[in-house]
Amino acid sequence: MNAVVFNSVTKRFCHRPALFNWLGRERGGATVALRRVSLQVPTGEALVLLGPNGSGKTTTLKLISTMLIPDEGVVTVCGADTSQEGGTVRRKVGFAVANERSFFPRLTARENLDFFAVLEDVSKEERAARVEEKLSLTGLADAADTLVMKFSSGMYQRLGVARALLKNPEILLLDEPTRSLDPGSAMRFWPFVRQLLSGGTTVVLTTHSFQEAAAVGDRIAVLRGGELRSEREFRRGDLQSNDLLTNDGPSIDEVKALYFQASADNEDNPAFETAQ
Amino acid sequence: MRRVSLTEKLVAIVRRDVLTTIRYRNGFLLSAVGVLAEVVAFRYLARAIGPAFRPEGVDYFAFLVVGSGFYTFLITGVQAFLSTVQDAQQTGTLEVLLTTSTPAPVLIFLSSFSAFAGKLLNLAVFLAVGLLLFRVPLLHPNLAGVCLIFVLSLAVALAMGVFAAALQIAVQRGSVVIWLLGSVWFLTGTLFPVGALPLPLRWVAWWIPVTHSLTGMRGALLLGKSTPELASEILWLSGAAALLVPASLAFFSWVLRRGRREGTLSAY
């Protein structure tokens, strides 16, 4: 059974230039964020999305979460069409967004989570314990009563994961979840994700880290210019150990090869190119 | 099956807004001082104009306190709600809120309600200071009428707030609604009676909901008019609420779907 299915999905963003645009020369037209992308994520597996900036990774997550609706094609989550059955989809999906500031700055971490737990229909009887559990799980128990405006980027990021987990989602979307974490926390985060997978949660994760992709992914897809350039499934044994060295997923070299194979023709504008 | 009631959700939203407001400590104190200063200014304005001026048959100070207090409540409620939406857009909270299990129209309506609840405290202080401290005589106020006019006016203002939020998401300019409401304030009978306007402007004033809110509120609170005597205001406001509340929610839902399609939910 597939938890998430993309069936020939296209997503465009139209830019309407300003009035009297000759004054500022803003670029108009449309940007194709995803172009006829088809993919499946089986229940209980982790799909890792790799790709350069602007390749369509976050758009893919937003389409699953119903933040966006596809222009063409169909996205289904546990059999529900995101365009038609948004409410059903939202009850199943937890999304840790990359925007770290998406909290109420003058509420504490506990107050923020409690607020979102109410909106996520976590019952009153369970709520306090659920919030406490997610705070502990993300290592924020000691900062629970601190206003989040005083948080560091890494703490925001952990709080974002805690929020996404509040409803114990069937599908967890993680947008560059370790971007601001220290290396130690990041390396503890990967086995944590594998543990969620073994509990039946489906995970879709975007990252720029080959190490993260290797540590978490059951399948890895590479997006480039809105197109799905390559996708590969990696067989894993039952991962119970927290030691990444015993991880029988793909090696970092395999992930790198997959990534660069998808962009061999080097069609991008290269960033930070050094002089030859 | 719903596991968390609407009341619980409303309480959570109000709690969030109250906590946020009181944690802006200086802002909270300054707005309280502002309310008191306005009442005192009205007291001296009424004294300067003299006791002979009794618009709609009531003391001018009472006319100002009820008119300005209630008008400010309705307009700043819309403004506060719009600010909440704008802040949520800028921080990226809006997108996250709209992916929770709570349906967006419910969420937006409850948030709007909370914004008005915050301004209710201002109104209470305004009226308490104005009517009690300065001892304005109330002639057997019709409390049922006051409540009815208040609820109907609130429903219309909530709808305006939802319209403003929808415009904010659609074209990033929800402040147009505030501008429209603000630009017609002199027609609504806030500082002087509508009867002082020329006939064509009186006709325009009749189409503005706040005009009926203020007339009804003054009639019920200051003149003690019975509910049948308030019928024209009650009917007008009921009709407006019946039309505007569903229309604003339908418009908001449409805008939301458009925002999801165009990816502009958090554009500001």
Image: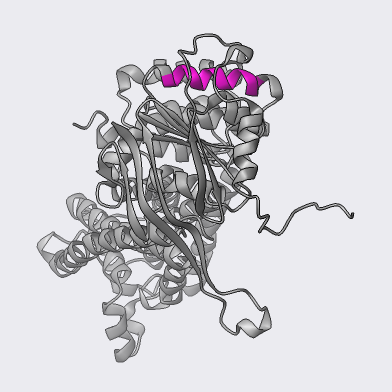
On the image, which quarter does residue A158 sit in? top right
Q: Position of residue B187 (x, y in %)?
A: 37, 78
Q: Give the range drawn in magenta.
A: A185-197
On the image, which quarter does residue A196 sit in? top left
Q: Position of residue B122 (x, y in %)?
A: 45, 49
How many badges with numbers are in the image? Answer: 0
Asked if residue A140 is among those painted magenta in the image, a careful observer would answer no
Q: Residue furthest top?
A: A241
Name the quarter where the C terminus of chain B is drawn.
bottom right
Taking depth in this image into account, of A61 and B28 the one nearest to the observer is: A61
| Left or right of B105 in this view: A11 | right
Residue A105 seen in this snapshot = yes
Question: Image height check: is A80 above or below B262?
Answer: above
Question: Image height check: is B192 above or below A38?
Answer: below
Q: Where is residue A113 in the image (x, y as percent from the top left)?
A: 46, 28
Taking depth in this image into account, of A225 and A153 the one nearest to the observer is: A225
Question: Image height check: is A107 above or below B151?
Answer: above
Q: Residue sitting at 27 percent across and 85 percent down?
A: B203
Main secondary structure type of the part rendered in magenta: helix
Taking depth in this image into account, of A19 and A15 the one nearest to the observer is: A15
On the image, which quarter does residue B162 sit in? bottom left
Q: Residue sitting at 27 percent across and 55 percent down?
A: B150
Q: Residue furthest right?
A: A276
| Left or right of B31 in this view: B140 | left
Taking depth in this image into account, of A160 and B114 the one nearest to the observer is: A160
Q: Residue furthest left?
A: B228
Name the quarter where the N terminus of chain B is drawn.
top left
Residue B26 seen in this snapshot = no
Q: Where is residue A162 in the image (x, y as percent from the top left)?
A: 49, 26
